[in-house]
Image: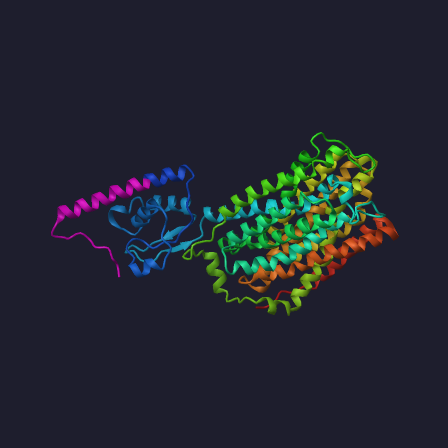
Amino acid sequence: ANSSREPCAASPLLAFWTRFSMKCFVLLSLAALASCDANGAAPPAYAAAGPQDSSATAASRQRPSDLVSVAARWALTRGGAFEAPRARIQKLLRRRTGVVEKVSQGGGAVAVADKGLPIAGAASVVGGVLVHLCLGTIYCFGNFMSYMPKDMLYFKGAAAEGNPHALLVLPVTMLFQCMGLPIGALLQKHLPPRVVALIGSWVMVTGVYLSSYATDLNTFMVFYSMIFGLGIGSAYTAAWVEGWKWFPRRRGLVSGAVLTGFGAGGFFFNRIGTKLANPNNLNAIDGTFPMEVYSNWGYMLRSLAVIYGTMTAIGAFLIRPPPKSYVTLNSQGLKSAGTRSLTVPQAIRTKQFWLIWACIFTSVCGGLNVSANYKYLGAAAENLNDDAYLSLVGGLGALANGAGRLFWGTMADSYGFKAPVLSMTAMQAVLFPLYKISTNSRPTFLVATMLAYFCLGGNFSIFAGLMPKTFGPENGAAIYSVMYTAFGSTAIASFFAAKKLIADFGWQGVFNGLGALSVLSFLIGSAFTPLKL
């Protein structure tokens, strides 16, 4: 029932005074709304009931948080004296909340159309980016390892033949990241995603901080690979699932934008880590830095842990779910399409799941090898052995990783799965056999490393956005947590395969093999057909 009452007709003076007072109140509120809008104040977008709703109806809706918006919405439900400023009120509400409210002349329910950028939705995406900037420091270890004390590079402390055992840190970290993903998905069923993102991030921070006190590789990997990796996995999808709810038809763009932070984090923190560990830009001689660089190892990790903790706390604070009554036309379209969502066991039993898994396994190993070994390769080449230059290569590579996540995610939104994944794997098939040759000059090595990172980023954003499109939106994050085992598996397998290939064929043989795997990934991607839900 409509709870508002018109003034009594027998009291024209009272009626006039009531309408005059309310008009003044609304016009003052309109001025306040314009002022708030000009100052950038913008609460979350609401599709709220007007003041005329009955208490039963209003209780089922999410009410707006500020009196100014209440007054403006009330004015929209009135006729007569408030007709003139209606368009202005609608415009300001759209700018303030990101929605347009279609109100019948007599009041009643409010329909909401997605006609602008919801400020709270954009803030949630930004919060996810901040969290992923810190999670993405997993790729910094290829740079940080050069500052690791020499007695921590091998499991038994003393140097051994072949590559350092510390090269196993990144693959094992990714393996535990895979284990953390289903933990994060399980926690999201009982806790808000922002809380899960914060818990996972601070587990990661704890691992980094404790690893700074390790004196041998075994202890270091317990804290850095295991705890750090579990924290990354737990927070990984929690950082973007709210963004998917705000922008249901732009899931690839949302995950690509958030994962841009995951890639770009390496750019910033590679530079910060290098500045903390090697402030005087000393170069390694025969692969060894002066002792003053190694003595900064623990200080570097502890300082980074404090920065990670601060940034992830701010990011988690910004992540917000859309109100229950927030219904965009995009999500209405998704619901009206009649699609269903598969559970994780149902998805695993489909052919499409294993085609995607195999496509990831064969495609991503090349980029992971480059991210782990680029500095090791560069330091071995006399013309590239400059710590500042190699740190810059890693930083720009991480930036290219972030750009690739956004670019390939957007392409997947626009053109579907096949076109971007076939383009990306074709690029890799040409790039990797030429990568060892690129060490002949600094410009070519920089470009080749950036391209490898650019494609690596695409592997993450394309497949993350594919999950809800292929298996349905309800369990997309949970299914991706299982799919992510392909990334961890290929990281471990490629480490041991590369070790064998280096001994038999050298680095050129390794990169030839990575190019061949990209060709295989291209063929697997060509065989993929969408699942009919």
Q: Position of residue 494 (x, y in %)?
A: 77, 55
Left or right? Give the position of 155 relative to 63. Answer: right
Total marks in image: 0
In the picture, the quarter occupied by the C terminus is bottom right
Q: Nearer the viewer, residue 523 or 491?
A: 491
Q: Nearer the viewer, residue 495 or 209?
A: 209
Query: Per the image, is 395 magenta?
Result: no
Nearer to me, 242 or 247: 242
Residue shown at 21%/43% (left/top)? Answer: 20
Foreground of the two, 383 or 337:
383
Farthest residue toward the right?
A: 504
Q: Main secondary structure of the magenta part?
A: helix
Which quadrant of the rendered structure holds the N terminus?
bottom left
Task: Tell me if 91 is positioned left or right of 136 in this view.
Answer: left
- Which segment is the magenta one? 1-30
Q: Is residue 53 above or below residue 119?
A: below
Given the current orientation, which residue lies at the most extreme top position?
Answer: 280
Residue at x 15% of width, y 47% of height: 14
On the picture, is 122 further left or further right than 177?
A: left
Residue drawn 33% across and 58% down?
59
Res 261 visible: no
Q: Residue 479: x, y in percent?
A: 60, 62
- Residue 381 image offset from top left, x and y in percent: 82, 38
Residue 65 position in % (x across, y down): 37, 48
Residue 483's place in the image compared with 119, above or below, is below
Question: Taking the image as drawn, is residue 351 in sight?
Answer: yes
